[in-house]
Amino acid sequence: MNGGEGSDRAGTVAAVDLGATSGRVILGHVDGRAGRLELEHVARFPNGPVRLASGLHWDLTGLYRDLTAGLADAFRRDPSVASIGVDSWAVDYGLLRGDRLLGQPFHYRDDRNARAVDRVHDVVPFAELYRRNGLQFLPFNTLYQLAAERDEPGGCLAIADSLLLVPDLIGFELTGRRVAERTNASTTGLLGVHSGEWDDELIEQLGLPASVFAPIVAPGESLGGLRASVAAELGAPSGVEVVAVGSHDTASAVVAVPMQAESAAYISCGTWGLVGVELEHPVTTDAAREANFTNEGGVDGRVRFLHNVMGLWLLSESVRWWERDGETIVLSELLAAAASVTGPVAVFDANDARFMAPGDLPGRIAEWCGEQGVPAPQTRAEFARSIIESLAEAFAGAVRQASVLSGVDVATIHVVGGGALNELLCRRTADRSGLPVLAGPVEATAIGNVLVQARAQGFVDGSLEDLRALVAAAFEPRRYEPRGR
């Protein structure tokens, strides 16, 4: 394994991995020379939206409380932890004036964003935006959120002196340093797709204050040591540093996709399904724009050329809806029942905008079926099977599009994240794509976070391919061969 050559140290780092439904603190034990990569789960805590009078928000204060409690536990378990890295979902941000957070960050599913889309496109048409930022259209991209913030009565943008995306905001609380990590900044729509720097001209065109945007840093750069007060609270030794990782969780997940060939596609599958290929250069053709593919920053300057599919949100929100009256649904039992469904089920458009908001997703699926003249599912097992089949078809279609648009002749699909545990989804994705699916590792995001830190600390070295060789040796994927549709 080449990743360990030249590295003569072993050590431990702490990964804070914040997802749209939960957060975790995980210790990563790494020894590149010995080919050792192990994870130790320390803490898991819920995360989710809070509906306030002003709209849908994140409870960042509660999230920070829970993650620091998890870090304190991590340092009690292993006082030798060398560094901390934080990743999270993309696009959402907090506004600061001095050290004060100006309200809880808005949740990307808040409906204020849709009202700002036309206002942005009236100033800069989407075709021009795509040429400059390379991003697929998603109504919650940060530039639309900021346009809404700018125009709202009582909005805080006018009085803020800095804007930080969620992982950068956590990094600020831990260290006092204000930065914008590049992979996550690339999801804002305000970063030049070719320069990797803030597009000052675009920011000015949109009437946004350039002064609030923090300096860009790359994954692997140190943000400095913990604040003295934070170190004392965590029981951490002095000198423990916070390291910028691929702070967009998908950027960290792609680091840990054990791709051994350039012809592989990946699906980072959790709340969202991020489907794409890794490239050296962005693709900003009209065809890519029309297919709504995005070019987001990856670790080591790579490009994540991908398309967002709604993901397991469709299943988890349906379950939440069914459980609203107090019933408990065991997901493994529901999926087993779904796998036993033998008759045809509806295959709906998983990317239909009606499925974005929380609420009665089973009802909306039935509504879609009625509009299309397709028999709607009748039982919960049929709904679950319909969701799985629709996701598998959307994943397969996105892989085919990624291949055509990028010129990568995809021969294998890697599924990482929580979706790698969903045997039915992996099997049906293989069947519908006609390609073998390699499932795992499940904890790809935390692994990628750990590996970028470990390389910065000198516990492992080499290229992304070397890091992936370490992942492949430590976490053997499960293979699903296609069996036909």
Image (cartoon, rainbow, N blue to C red):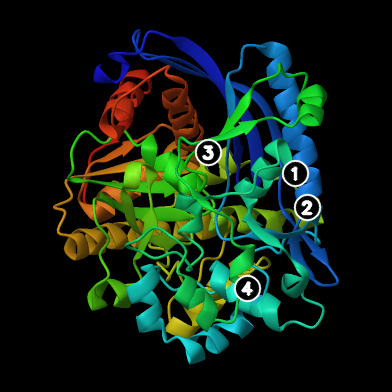
Residue indicated by mark 1:
63
Q: Is residue 416 visible to the viewer in this orientation of the structure?
A: no
Residue indicated by mark 4:
209
Question: Pointers 4 and 3 in contact (CB under 8 A)?
Answer: no
Badge 4 or badge 1: first in the primary sequence: 1
Question: Pointers 3 and 2 in contact (CB under 8 A)?
Answer: no
Residue indicated by mark 3:
244
Q: Quadrant of residue 195?
A: bottom left
Determine crowd level at label 2: few under 14, some 14-19, many 20+ residues with C-alpha closer than 10 A: some
In this rendering, the answer to whether 194 lies above or below 183 is: below
How far is mark 4 from mark 3, CA to CA?
25 Å
Q: Residue at x 70, y 18 (%)?
A: 238
**Which numbered tag is attached to residue 59?**
2
Give the quarter of the figure containing the N terminus. top left
How far is mark 1 from mark 3, CA to CA?
19 Å
Secondary structure beneath dot 1 equals helix
Q: Residue at x 79, y 51 (%)?
A: 99
Badge 3 or badge 2: first in the primary sequence: 2
Secondary structure beneath dot 2 equals loop
Secondary structure beneath dot 4 equals loop
User: Position of 362 compared to 287: left or right?
Assistant: right
Q: Which tag is nearer the camera, tag 1 or tag 3?
A: 3
**Which numbered tag is attached to residue 432?**
none
Q: Position of residue 366 (x, y in %)?
A: 55, 73
User: Position of 232 compared to 123: left or right?
Assistant: right
Question: Pointers 2 and 4 in contact (CB under 8 A)?
Answer: no
